[in-house]
Image (cartoon, helix red, strand yellow):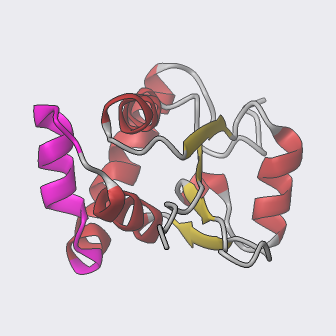
């Protein structure tokens, strides 16, 4: 009996160039054919659903892992999402190898994640975008 990999969906902030790079390279070069990426900034309905469940995109990406039985997917948010995705990566590219080494450990991801949020805040500010896609700048 062969085990199929779980379907993964990464909902990320498409306004953040770092988030966008990580999501695209994870999909293209991460060895995860079942990974789907969604720009949460561009998908108001999904972003609101996740926020209502306690997973605001302004505090990090969300990784949805489909359950084997077809029920509700398991959701991982922020550092947990990055750690879970990095655990799954099978990269051949140098930068993804480094990211996997840094973030595959949930403890290390939790320690380093505030730096990613800081870089995201800086990048969004440089682009003139609000940190929280649900609260546009006046």
Question: Where 65 falls versus 132 (above or below)?
Answer: below
The quadrant of the image that shows the C terminus is: top right
Percent coordinates x, y for residue 8 in the rendering: 57, 55
Percent coordinates x, y for residue 105 in the rendering: 22, 73
Q: Quadrant of residue 104?
A: bottom left
Identify the main secondary structure in magenta.
helix
Indicate whether residue 97 is drawn in magenta.
yes
Observer-nearest of 124 and 22 = 22
Asked if one can make out residue 118 in the rendered structure from this viewpoint, the answer is yes
Residue reaching furthest right?
Answer: 45
Question: Where 56 falls versus 22 (above or below)?
Answer: below
Q: Is residue 52 left or right of residue 105?
A: right
Residue found at x 85% / y 40%? 44
Percent coordinates x, y for residue 22 in the rendering: 37, 37
Percent coordinates x, y for residue 125 in the rendering: 49, 29
In the image, which residues are magenta? Answer: 91-107
Residue found at x 42% / y 41%? 120
Residue found at x 20% / y 49%? 99
Indicate whether residue 7 is drawn in magenta.
no
Q: Is residue 120 left or right of residue 137?
A: left
Q: Quadrant of residue 66?
A: bottom right
Residue found at x 43% / y 26%? 17
Observer-nearest of 45 and 8 = 8
Residue reaching furthest top?
Answer: 127
Number of numbered discs overlaid on the protein picture: 0
Asked if one can make out residue 114 in the rendered structure from this viewpoint, the answer is no
């Amino acid at each position: 009996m062969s085990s199929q990999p779980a379907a993964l969906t990464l909902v990320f902030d498409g306004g953040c160039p770092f988030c966008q790079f990580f999501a695209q390279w994870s999909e293209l070069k991460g060895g995860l054919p079942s990974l789907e990426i969604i720009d949460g900034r561009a998908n108001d309905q999904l972003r609101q659903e996740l926020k209502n469940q306690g997973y605001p995109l302004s505090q990090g990406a969300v990784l949805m892992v489909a359950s084997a039985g077809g029920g509700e997917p398991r959701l991982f948010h922020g550092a947990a999402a990055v750690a879970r995705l990095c655990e799954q990566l099978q990269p051949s590219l140098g930068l993804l190898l480094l990211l996997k080494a840094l973030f595959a450990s949930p403890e290390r991801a939790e320690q380093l994640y505030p730096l990613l949020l800081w870089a995201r805040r800086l990048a969004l500010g440089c682009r003139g975008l609000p940190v929280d896609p649900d609260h546009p700048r006046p």
